[in-house]
Image: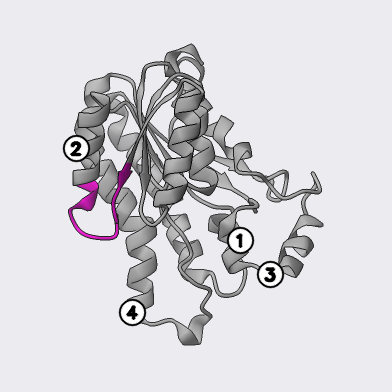
Amino acid sequence: MKDIAGRCVLVTGGATGIGAAISHAFAGAGAKVAVHFHSGGPAAANLLQQIQSEGGQAVGIGSDLTHPGKAAILVDQCVTALGGLDILVNNAGGMVARRELEDIDDAFIDAVFNLNVRSTIHCCQAALPHLAKSGAGAIINVSSVSARTGGSPGSSIYSGTKGFIATFTRSLARELAPKNVRVNAVSPGTIDTDFHARHSTPEKLEATRKTIPQARLGAARDCAGTVLYLASNDLAGYITGQIIEVNGGQLMA
């Protein structure tokens, strides 16, 4: 992936979990990385120290992307810090909480949509002029296996937002192709991160593990290689509008 070296990358939610693995992998490939975080300041500091100790280039930028206007400010800060923007990874997101149908209210719907949907839309909007200027821009969104399966009880709104991300990815791929911006997504299966520590019991995770052909939960690093592949114009220059499932065979598309 020699064409990754020297490119400017923004990873939203890039300080923990899958995002941290993606940030670390880009830096290891020689990219200049802006690691976005919200509440993960200490994790971001540790990640930046690790990247820099390995000779990588990275900066941390804190922002709450659920607030209007914050995405545009984040992108401007990234461009100023790195000198441009070639690759956008929309990884920021989350379930917020498990709520079954009778407990869902408008405030909860707004919270989940703001975190998973509006932040992605706004980051794409703010990044587009820079990605188009790049000449080989790439957007990689992060969906979820639950976009296809519907998820487990209590995750209906989250799963719905991830289904939106998958459809949005395909729509943008058609729209932005004339601007030489490719748009793809990775769709992680059950990845052993703090996400599931918060929202899934050990018993649920073990039951899920038994259904996976590779007989293990995913690790955050399992997603990073696919993201780098999709970002590389040398390796994936003719790939756009695709949702790549990364799940150990949990779902075979």
Disc number placed over residue 106 in the picture, else none: 4
- Label 4 to label 2: alpha-carbon separation: 32 Å
Mark 1: few/some/many CA within 10 Å (<14, 14-19, 20+): some
Q: Contact, CB < 8 Å: mark 3 with mark 4?
A: no
Q: Quadrant of the C terminus?
A: top right
Residue under the image location 66 percent in, 46 percent down: 247
Which label lies toward us, 4 or 2? 2
- Label 4 to label 1: alpha-carbon separation: 24 Å
Q: Give yes or no for residue 21 being in the magenta stretch.
A: no
- Label 3 to label 4: alpha-carbon separation: 27 Å
Residue 180, quarter of picture: top left
Q: Give yes or no for residue 66 being in the magenta stretch.
A: yes
Disc number placed over residue 201 in the picture, else none: 3
Mark toward the start of the polypeptide (2 vs 3): 2
Query: What residue did someone put label 1 on?
Result: 196
Residue under the image location 39 percent in, 66 percent down: 112
How far from the left and from the top, in percent, is residue 96? 45, 68
Which label lies toward us, 4 or 1? 1
Secondary structure at numbered mark 2: helix
Query: What residue did someone put label 2 on?
Result: 76
Query: Amino acid under label 4?
Result: Asp
175 left or right of 146? left
How far from the left and from the top, in percent, is residue 126? 21, 41
Secondary structure at numbered mark 3: loop
User: Where does the magenta region start and end?
Assistant: 61-72
Q: Relative to residue 55, is residue 185 depicted above or below?
A: below
